[in-house]
Image: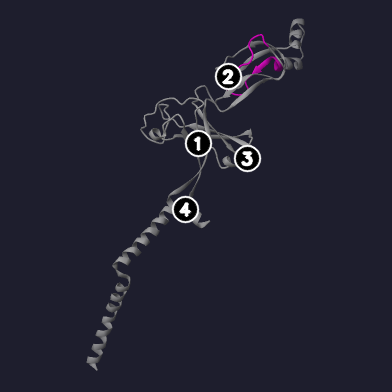
Amino acid sequence: MVNKSIFRNKADKGTPKSEHAALMTVIGPGNLLILLGIIIFLVGVMIYAVTVPINITTTTDAVVAYGEGTVDVVVENEGILSQLAVSNGDYVTRGDLLGVLTTEATATWVNNGAVLTDQQKSLVKRQTMIVAMESGVISNLNFQDGAYIPKNSTLGKIVKRENEDTTVVVQAYSSYEGAVNVKQGDKVFVDLESVNSDQYGYLRGIVRSVTLSGLSQDEESPIEMLIIIDPKVDDQGNYIWTKENNGFNGEITAGTSGTATIFTDQLYLIDLIIS
């Protein structure tokens, strides 16, 4: 009985070794390495899914400009331009005097030495003083001193700029659908036709504003949006490009065309998997 019990225990002890050997025979060392590689790959995918963002972008045509669009200086009343206070290229701030218009009624009142009521004084001031409604640079003046200005004529244009030292901006035009997700502060890469992108990369910028530009000729997308982009500059005023130490220290001239890639959002792979 003792020897039989000992023999049975030895057989039992040998069983796990046989099962382990059988398992190794079925899987094999090579298959175990493949399984380990799959596990490592899946772990890497999960880490990527929660840590590395996917950039959502929109691309649109763009042009470099020295302002943020233009506004017409419209003279509501007719009369003689008795004083033109500005010239093309002058920078004006909102409320600055652009010119003085002398109307027939004004001349009659002044010549007769009449005592004007407050309402008449207000009318004279409104009729004779032409002021800037926006800050910017004067351009395309259509009249000079002494010229007769018909009612609702355009004296000239103001190229809107925040201040006299404003650097160039990039104007990007888009359909409403294309700009619906664009917002102030979005990062932008601008590819300019006049700059070698292989050497300098893309001009870095940031969205300043998104406004309604007007109606386009495209029946499918009739609403046009204007996106103002500020180029990024360093402490020395040099433009910042995607390729570091590129050595670009030149100017970017107005009228230069290009494309603007706007980074509107970021998604993670895990968000797409969950949704």
Query: Could you say which is closer to the camera, residue 192 or residue 36?
Result: 192
* Residue located at (44% from left, 53% from top): 50
The kind of residue tagged 4 is Leu
Tell me if 130 is positioned left or right of 193 in this view.
right
Q: CA distance from mark 2 to mark 1?
A: 28 Å
What is the x, y in percent for residue 258?
49, 33
Query: Residue under circle 1?
Result: 260
Query: Residue under circle 3?
Result: 221
Q: Earlier in the sequence, mark 2 or mark 1?
A: 2
Please state the extent of the stretch shown in magenta in the rendering.
Answer: 125-147
Query: Residue under circle 2?
Result: 138
| Within-10-Å neighbours for mark 2: few <14, some 14–19, many 20+ | many
Task: Identify the secondary structure beneath mark 2.
Answer: strand
Task: Identify the secondary structure beneath mark 3.
Answer: loop
Q: CA distance from mark 4 to mark 3?
A: 31 Å
State yes or no: discs 4 and 1 in contact (Cβ < 8 Å).
no
Question: Where on the picture, by quarter, is residue 228?
Answer: top right
Task: Identify the secondary structure beneath mark 4.
Answer: helix
State yes or no: discs 2 and 3 in contact (Cβ < 8 Å).
no
| Figure colour scheme | one colour
Q: Earlier in the sequence, mark 4 or mark 3?
A: 3
Above or below, comparing residue 65 to residue 221 in the picture: above
The kind of residue tagged 3 is Ser
| Within-10-Å neighbours for mark 3: few <14, some 14–19, many 20+ | some
Query: Could you say which is closer to the camera, residue 234 or residue 222?
Result: 222
What is the x, y in percent for residue 243?
39, 35
Confirm whether the magenta stretch covers residue 146.
Answer: yes
Q: CA distance from mark 2 to mark 3?
A: 33 Å
